[in-house]
Image (cartoon, helix red, strand yellow):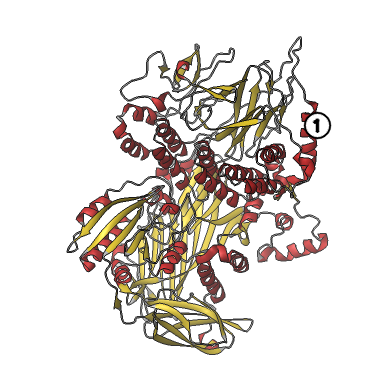
Amino acid sequence: MKSKTSVSMPKIFQVNLKLLFYVLLFLGIKTFAQSPELNVKGDDAEKVRLSQLIVNVKVVGNIAYTTAEMHFFNSGTRQMEAELIFPLPENVSVSRYAIDINGKLREAVPVNKNKGKQVFEAIEHRRVDPGLLEKVDGNNFRTRIYPLLPNGERIVIIGYEEELSAFDKDNLAYQLVSRYPKKLDKFEINVSVLGASTSPKITEKSGQDISFSKWNQSFQTSLKKENYQPSEKLVFKIPLQQKTPSVVIQDVGSQYYFYGNIFVEGNKIAKKAPNSLGIIWDNSLSCQTRDLQKELDLLEAYFKKIQNTKVSLYFLNYTFEKQREFVISNGNWSELKSILQNTKYDGGTRFSQINLLNDDEYLFFSDGLSSLSENSLPKTKKAIYTVTSSASADFAFLNYSSMQTGGCFINLNQLNTENALDKLVNTNLKFLGIKENFTVTDLFPMEGTSASGSFSFSGISLNPKNEITLLFGYEKGAVLERKISLDAAIQNTNDINIEKLWAQKKIANLDLQYAKNATEIELLGKKYGIITKNTSLIVLEDIRDYISYDITPPAELRPEFDRIKKQEQDTNLAKQKSNWESVESYFAALNSWWKEDKKYVAPKVLPKSKKNKRTAYETIKGDADAALTVDEPVGAGAAVEIMEDNSVYNQVASSPPQVDMVRFVAPTVVEMKDKKVGYEAESAAKSLSGKVEGVAINATSERASSLNYSVSDTIAFNSKNKDKNWNPDRLYLKALASAPKEKQYDLYLELRKAQERNPSFYFDIAHFFYNQGDVKKAVQVLSNIGDLGLENHQLYKTLTYTLRQWQDFDDALFTAKQVAKWRAHEPQSLRDYALALEDAGNYQEAFDQLIKALEVNYYGEMSGQYEGVEDIILMDINRLVTEYKGLNTDKLDKKYLEKMPVDMRVIMNWNLMDVDLDLHIIEPTGEECYYGHKTTQAGARFSKDFTQGYGPEQYLIRNAVKGKYQIKTNFYGETELTENGPATIMVEIYTTRAGKTARTLKTIQLGKIKENEVLAEIIW
């Protein structure tokens, strides 16, 4: 019996992007991945808002320490949840995170990223409110705000240190950029600048009447407003002391951490203008909202400077294609400029497709985020200048890639056009290290770092008084020296944490080669409480949770934590387990079933399965503006053949649907054998029949050459709870089908404007093009899903399923590997990776990953999500060792290698964690095998019923009965509050005849809900 027999949840929907609250970012930002997003879930999403923002800034030298206190208020009558994602500037990471627990702020503590994720999810399932802040792709950070109680508020504090960039040769700049669609109840900003000789100023463009006043040894200003909407940008100019080195020191256990900033300006050496220039223009979806004007201004200045050259333009998204060549004469680049201004942005990103040809040097305009391949550029002896204007970018990758080729990284978020041009046309000074001094260690930045204008450095002196000589120059050696005196007695400060600043600078340099330095980065992140790629910050409500999960709490809880730990001596640690512990019992049950070798004998009276009826609930996904629809009840009756739902995908523009084929209602349904059972489907007469090893599958083939047989693309469902549902009408598909073929892609781009963050839109459009035979366009459209979320494993599972089905095995291998990396504790994700390895021909690695899926540890509280996969993985292993001879199976006891072939095996997987889906198989005898009836008279066997987690659920039959098998699914709703669209399922069908196994994969995205909808039929 199902565990969730009568659950009713309020409907949920993803708030429209137009209503996103743009919170706080200290850099120029726009929309999409550029801006902070507060994604509020729930019918009353508009009730949640940022009500107060209090910003405190302290500037010492060229270091600014910023804390932002954000108050989120829920004026509604129901409990709400939100997720905040925000980018930060280059080389900046969050070093403070606090949330209010029971009305009191609690500071976060560092934890391994994967452990933090596991602990957070384990506690979250108890409906307790832990807090987790983690770094995701690029320099983006993500946290969850839950619960937001009715008429209540939650407070989140985020703090970080940053090195200020130059505004001009005389001033540093501090920028506060913020966007608010509504007024704030309270806005406050306090700025204190220590040690400046003259007063900071507000730039004219900031639009605020603010002035600084002298107070002791600092300049201060404050702005406090109520019922106020701040201007978009505040920029403070802070005078730069060029002649006097700014150095501060902190004594930590007789190790003297120092940080300094100087102004470096050597003789400029003009670089020879390239005869041929390659411009690589990232036109993937994530780059469409970068600051195009800044990039065009830089190119304008560059071509005006070099006057004449030949340019080859390459577009990079899912593909890498040369567009054409341009001749720039006397600085005229109008033709190229027009092309760039009218570029279409679409698709995910694959840096692996880049092919550097014979240009003298390259300008690479990108955010540095490769969503569908590894972040790496091909090796070349030609200089690559990486350029970004995106706030949400992988700055470390772009910096390192240019450094490796002798080029330069140009961050237009921090550089004006004049300074950026200088890096393009002149050979830039490099930092070459220091003169020999064995009493100075761990000095950063690393040698080879570009140095011009404001240059900062940090290290450790073993003596309180010391002297270092910084060396700057070019490839042939140093041309400039700067002596720096260190004196702890004079330069000591407590105004800023120099040790932590040094650690952040070291992490930023180690991050340039993350794979090589991952362990050291994690140790530094944990020690100094800095978020890194593998270190997060976590807040727990109950001290018992800190004890159970062995996480050292913040200082306020440390005495109690130590006392309890001493008394209990780890007796209450949360237990970790792996599925390996239960493999033997699962195998014994499987093997016993198989050896029974049951064959069907027709009984006089067939047993009737008693289904446990449950109340359904569902989540509204997709376009939040879509019209809501209500289904008419579907009459009961005998099961009918459900054919492929491809009418809209396959229509020819000049041939409108026939009246007797498609009937448009709300939602659109098609009449099949006088029963309304689907939407937008075509007549059964149009379905194709496939033959696979003597097995006929009744379903329309979406592309006959790619699969032996297939099941339907999209399945319509009815729900018992009909007041609101995700709208699957897919009018955009009808529009595409009615357009001439040559205009369909441009129409898709136009339709996308209203669907930009809806995964289902890309899924549907991709299938539309795929079924027209345009595989290249289909995969490009599908790849947009990879750009919709940062480290979003649910979306990447959807990608993996579809790419495997379309036999794009290389890309599927990458997406599956990413999920396995992000979710290293999930047996299901490791199984997906193993199957992708098998598809790619890596059979030994596939076997090893299946073993790892059984060995991986997870907290016992998550057994409902992960335990029970053993059944499926054991059968995978059994099939693998049977099909591929010569595998090294030493990791597995020989008893598990006993062959257990079956005639038919059906597995159903899905991509969302807390979704309740059920697999049902109706055998030719009429008997139904499912969670409530796990064995049949024909000898079938059903696996564990997953009411949480990703499944999978599996049907096995050793001796198949001749006739028709119907594969059905029930969808009972979901509890996960995300923007990932409706659940996506993958059906795997294995059939074996004469020792040969055929496999079919099919990805299905659920729309409208109907209990016991038929997905496919197998004729045996």
Indicate the secondary structure of the residue bearing disc 1: helix
Residue 395 drawn above or below residue 912: below
Q: Quadrant of residue 382?
A: bottom left
Q: Nearer the viewer, residue 228 or 882?
A: 882
Residue 350 drawn above or below residue 807: below
Q: Residue drawn 29% across and 34% down? A: 743
Left or right of residue 505, residue 834 in this image: right
Q: Quadrant of residue 639?
A: top right
Left or right of residue 147, residue 705 in this image: left
The amino acid sitting under disc 1 is: Ser
Q: Quadrant of residue 989?
A: top right
Which residue in the rendered view is the most extreme toward the top? 604
Q: Nearer the viewer, residue 57 or 1012?
A: 1012
Residue that numbered label 1 is attached to: 592
Is residue 324 in view?
yes
Number of callouts in the render? 1
Q: Nearer the viewer, residue 223 or 333?
A: 333
**Residue 588 in the image: x percent, y percent?**
80, 36
Is residue 413 in view?
no
**Residue 13 in the image: x percent, y percent?**
50, 37
Left or right of residue 1014, residue 357 in this image: left
